């Protein structure tokens, strides 16, 4: 029986295994060095914040794997001999495969800062990081201050986590405004204010120079690059992005770039070796997407797609329209299609912000054709299927503005803002559009 070996028990590896099992009787082994069972990485923060226990982050009961004949192996793969189709484990063991899938995810970036490996310095990626946080930052008596380095989505989650235990946080962000490489200016500014309003000491245009140690090898302070200021702290969170977790492949024959190089079929340069999830790097990016996509749903989609190929129906990875969602403290953020920090050639942005609350949207459209390109929403929940449909149908921005009520997905009795938004749109572009009432018939119609 063909033996399928998957390195990595995250969303991509586990989705792949589940779908291979649905489609075939193949022998499946999943290897991971991190945890015995699959868990939802995106939910780690809620464990620290006390909303759930770690076991609640595991979507499947422990019996699920045996029942579905998916073997789980806790081991660290240190080498791959693709000529003989054999894996070497750090503990000395080995394992043969017929087909191998690398689904090893990411690791937090470290940029060679002095002191980056001290006790109390951690990323926020693995289960071990959560354990470390419990050790070094259980409360504000043990941890008087934490310093977070790097202002992306994981950085702000870590700030929220520490804030939930009343641990003072200083947040060092290299950019002049929060996540301004991704967010348009109005949104980025709003998030700056939102962070400060949560009593987080946000330092923009600020870099880490060095992390200093006490006499026991534990972090005691950081030095700021620009000013030389020394900030006393007990924990340093390194959240300056992530990189594919592929160092163990460097001595193999598998082609690597920043990640494991794959084609549209998620195949590497070596026959019977594939890569999916955060660690896979497309030879050529798909549309405006990045060649490496470190997001949950694309890992799941790659797993579903590759299961077809492994089971005899060779299928290309086609992720469809870009979307994503996240949370900035109290603000929910969603994005559909493309809204770049600065409009590209032939593009324009329409931005609406609530006069008091941290609620706003930015809509990107083509200046010449008025085609709708994408939307960012903060504090208003929108319906994914609707924007997916409008992008497929290549609707223009006037249509999107007029039918925005169809897209609203906030719970019943939430305040609605579509009329305000449309009024500002009409004022700005000298149009006279009217807002259409929400229609369930339209909402459930297909593109
Ligand atoms: C705190 C946090 C919040 C996030 N929030 C969001 C969100 O809101 N939305 C979103 O879309 N994405 C989010 N992400 C990103 C998302 O979680 C990842 O894109 C996704 O989990 C990656 O899945 P994966 O299967 O590719 O890899 P992973 O989940 O990283 O799994 C890979 C596994 O392989 C193991 N492994 C690696 N190398 C070896 C080896 N040599 N031998 C054995 N095992 C090995 C690793 O230890 C790990 O267990 C978040 C990530 C973090 C860290």
Image (cartoon, rainbow, N blue to C red):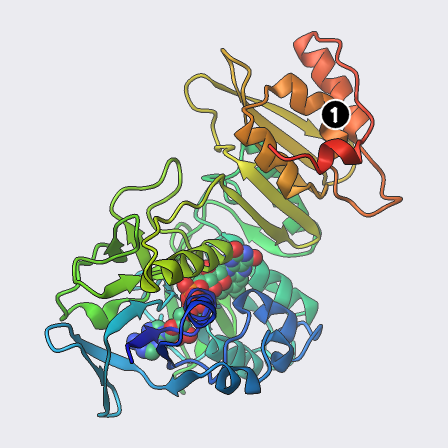
The quadrant where residue 17 appears: bottom left
Asked which quadrant contains residue 184, the reply is: top right
For image coordinates 60% across by 68% down, the residue present is 45
Image quadrant of ligand 1?
bottom left
For residue 282, side relative to residue 192 (left or right)? left
> Can you say whether 133 is above or below 179 in the image?
below
> What residue is shown at x 70% (from left), y 75% (from top)?
50
Classify mark 1: helix, strand or loop: helix
Category of crowding for the residue at label 1, using alpha-carbon neighbours closer than 10 angstroms: few (below 14), some (14–19), many (at least 20): many
- Give percent across and percent down for residue 189: 60, 37
Left or right: residue 381 versus residue 93 is right
At x 45%, y 50%, the residue is 206
Q: Position of residue 395 (x, y in %)?
A: 59, 22
Where residue 14 sits in the image (x, y, percent)? 45, 71
In which quadrant of the rendered image does the C terminus lie?
Answer: top right
Which residue has dot 1 on it?
421
Q: Residue lying farthest bottom? A: 92
Residue reaching furthest to the left: 83
* Dot 1 beta carbon under 8 Å from ligand 1: no
- Residue 117 at least partly seen: no
- The residue that appears at 35% across and 51% down in the rendered structure is 315
In this rendered view, identify the residue nearer to me: 6 or 446. 446
Q: Where 400 sits versus 120, above or below? A: above
Q: In front: 266, or 256?
A: 266
Quarter of the figure with residue 239: bottom left
Tell me if 339 is positioned left or right of 378 in this view. Answer: left
Q: How many marks?
A: 1
Tell me the quarter of the image containing the N terminus. Answer: bottom left
Q: Position of residue 244 (x, y in %)?
A: 33, 61
């Amino acid at each position: 029986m063909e033996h399928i070996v998957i390195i990595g028990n995250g969303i991509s590896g586990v989705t792949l295994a589940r779908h291979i099992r649905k489609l075939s009787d193949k022998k499946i082994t999943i290897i991971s060095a991190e945890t015995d069972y699959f868990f939802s990485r995106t939910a780690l923060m809620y464990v620290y914040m006390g909303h759930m226990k770690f076991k609640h982050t595991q979507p499947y009961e422990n019996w699920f794997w045996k029942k579905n004949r998916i073997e789980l192996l806790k081991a660290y793969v240190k080498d791959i001999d693709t000529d003989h189709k054999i894996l070497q484990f750090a503990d000395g063991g080995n394992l043969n495969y017929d087909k191998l899938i690398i689904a090893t995810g990411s690791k937090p970036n470290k940029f060679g800062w002095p002191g980056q490996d001290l006790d109390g310095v951690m990323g926020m990626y693995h289960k071990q990081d959560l354990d470390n946080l419990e050790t070094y930052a259980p409360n504000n008596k043990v941890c008087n201050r934490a310093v977070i380095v790097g202002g992306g989505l994981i950085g702000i989650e870590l700030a929220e986590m520490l804030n939930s235990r009343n641990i003072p946080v200083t947040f060092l962000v290299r950019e002049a405004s929060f996540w301004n490489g991704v967010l348009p200016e109005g949104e980025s500014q709003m998030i700056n204010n939102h962070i400060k309003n949560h009593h987080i000491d946000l330092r923009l245009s600020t870099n880490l120079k060095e992390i200093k140690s006490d006499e026991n090898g534990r972090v005691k302070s950081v030095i700021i690059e620009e000013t030389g200021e020394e900030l006393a702290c007990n924990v340093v969170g390194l959240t300056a992005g992530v990189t594919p977790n592929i160092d163990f492949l460097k001595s193999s024959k598998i082609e690597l770039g920043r990640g494991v190089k794959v084609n549209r079929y998620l195949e590497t340069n070596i026959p019977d070796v594939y890569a999916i999830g955060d660690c896979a790097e497309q030879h050529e990016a798909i549309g405006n997407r990045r060649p490496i996509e470190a997001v949950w749903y694309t890992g799941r989609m790659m797993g579903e797609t590759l299961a077809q190929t492994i089971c005899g129906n060779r299928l290309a990875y086609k992720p469809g329209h870009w979307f994503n969602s996240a949370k900035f403290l109290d603000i929910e953020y969603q994005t559909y299609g493309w809204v770049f920090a600065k409009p590209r050639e032939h593009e324009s942005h329409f931005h609406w912000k609530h006069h008091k609350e941290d609620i706003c949207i930015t809509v990107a459209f083509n200046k010449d054709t008025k085609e709708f390109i994408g939307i960012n929403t903060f504090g208003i929940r929108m319906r994914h299927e609707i924007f997916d449909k409008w992008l497929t149908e290549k609707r223009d921005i006037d249509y999107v503005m007029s039918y925005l009520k169809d897209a609203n997905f906030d719970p019943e009795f939430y305040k609605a803002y579509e009329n305000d938004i449309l009024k500002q749109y009409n004022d700005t572009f000298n149009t006279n559009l009217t807002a259409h009432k929400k229609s369930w018939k339209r909402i459930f119609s297909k593109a």
